[in-house]
Image (cartoon, grey):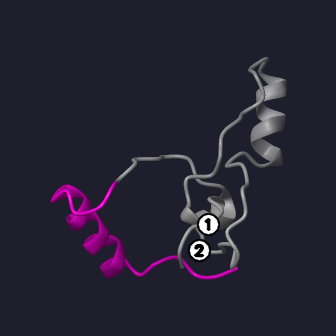
Amino acid sequence: MTQKPQPAEVAQALVEALQGQRPAIVCYAQCEPCQWGQCYDEPTPHSWAGPEDIEHAQATGQPEPTGTCACSCARTGDPR
């Protein structure tokens, strides 16, 4: 796993997206490892939901959480 981009890199990417120089997608859900910068070296599709999220959904009668982690390391072919 690699570290997440530095805040200055994220800020620059945001500026470029706001100026229309690059595409942007706003995603809110990241898996816990990605939230702490423990990202995959080779991008690997993975869910944002962990075992606790699935257990909570089952215990409260909600559908099982689905969806891909919002981190770029969850998209195959992501240039690093």
The amino acid beneath tag 2 is Gly
Q: Compare residues 28 and 51 and report the one nearer the observer.
A: 28
Quadrant including the N terminus: bottom right
Q: Disc 2 marks which residue? A: 37
Q: Disc 1 marks which residue? A: 77
Horizontally, residue 22 falls left or right of residue 41, namely: left
Q: Residue at x 60, y 70 (%)?
A: 36
Q: Residue furthest left?
A: 19
Q: Which residue is drawn at 22% across and 63% down?
A: 21
Q: Is residue 12 magenta?
A: yes
The amino acid beneath tag 1 is Gly
Q: Which residue lies furthest to the front in this view?
A: 77
Crowd band around label 1 with a 10 angstrom C-alpha radius: few (<14), some (14–19), many (20+): few
Q: Which residue is drawn at 66% across and 74% down?
A: 38
Q: What stretch is highlighted in magenta?
A: 1-23
Crowd band around label 2 with a 10 angstrom C-alpha radius: few (<14), some (14–19), many (20+): some
Q: Do the residues labelled 2 and 1 touch (CB within 8 Å)?
A: no
Quadrant including the C terminus: bottom right
Q: Residue at x 20, y 66 (%)?
A: 15
Horizontally, residue 79 falls left or right of residue 22, namely: right
Decide which of tag 2 and tag 1 comes sooner along the chain.
2
Residue 23, image quadrant: bottom left
Q: Compare residues 13 and 63 and report the one nearer the observer.
A: 13
Q: Gap between marks 2 and 1, in whole Å? A: 19 Å
Q: Compare residues 59 and 5 and report the one nearer the observer.
A: 5
User: What kind of element bears circle 1?
Assistant: loop
Residue 17, image quadrant: bottom left
Horizontally, residue 13 falls left or right of residue 59, namely: left
Residue 38's disc number: none
Q: Is residue 3 magenta?
A: yes
